[in-house]
Image (cartoon, rainbow, N blue to C red):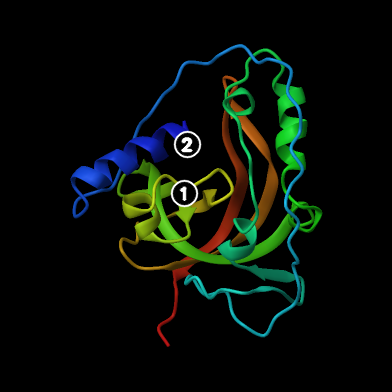
Amino acid sequence: MTRILLITFSLFCALYPAQAQRVVRGEPIAPAPEIKAAAPTPIAVTAAAETNAVSATTKAVKMNGKEIVVGFDKLGGFTFPLTSELEYNTNTPAAADVIVNAMSPANIRKLDNQLVTIDGFMLPLTYEKDMLTEFLLMRDQMECCFGGTPEMHQFIKVHVKSPVPPIDFSAVRVRGVLRVSADRQSGVLSDIYRMEADKVRPVPEH
């Protein structure tokens, strides 16, 4: 469902960039042939003095006590050769997930189940009245409208413990427990990054 939302949102953005907000897309689920893993491109995740900025200059994956500050330049900064057989797989989803999970470098997989803070932009998914209970956190607004649909490792599906107001056109800072693993809905890969967030707030202006 997440991928459906992202693809249609991209098409909507292209036609109505000033009004773009939501989405839907679908493809048939095909039987999966024998799948071979592609070697991920390794990246270095090191401590840095920089903060978790949203811009392309983001450098950080740093320790701050038990909390890890990470940027999308690290979460999405490696090659992720996802094939249609891996993305749409109802026959052998568990085997496909093993390959999908191995595409993330070891230092990214180590972020699984860690308390993480990251900046990004909201794409609303689920409302409770006028408040959000679920949204996608993306690197920037331009990515969906002018740079194509984000790849599977370039967004986080966020569920909030307490509903929050939507924040449009401004960066938000989200803190919560990050999960790094393939998640499927009816055989379709939905996401590889998920977060149970306990704090969502606007990024402070400098």
Q: Is residue 107 above or below residue 35?
A: below
Proximity of marks 1 and 2: CB atoms separated by less than 8 Å: yes
Residue 71, image quadrant: bottom right
Tell me the amino acid under the disc marked 1. Answer: Leu
Q: CA distance from mark 1 to mark 2?
A: 8 Å
Q: Is residue 67 left or right of residue 10?
A: right
Say which element carries label 1.
strand
Q: Nearer the viewer, residue 123 or 58?
A: 58
In this view, 12 is above or below 94: below
| Image coordinates for residue 119, horizontal then vertical, percent | 51, 67
- Point 32% across, 53% down: residue: 146
Residue at 39% across / 37% down in the picture? Answer: 7
Q: Mark on residue 174? A: none
Is residue 121 something one can see in this rendering? Answer: yes
The residue that label 2 is drawn on is 2
Farthest-out residue, bottom: 206
- Quadrant of image for the C terminus: bottom left
Q: Secondary structure at mark 2?
A: helix
Residue 165 in view in this figure: no
Q: Which residue is mark 1?
A: 136
Residue 8 position within the rendered picture, expressed as x and y whole percent measured from the top left = 33, 35
Q: What amino acid is at disc 2?
A: Thr
Residue 100: image location, x then y, percent: 70, 36
Task: Tell me what residue is drawn at x 76 percent, y 77 percent.
Answer: 65
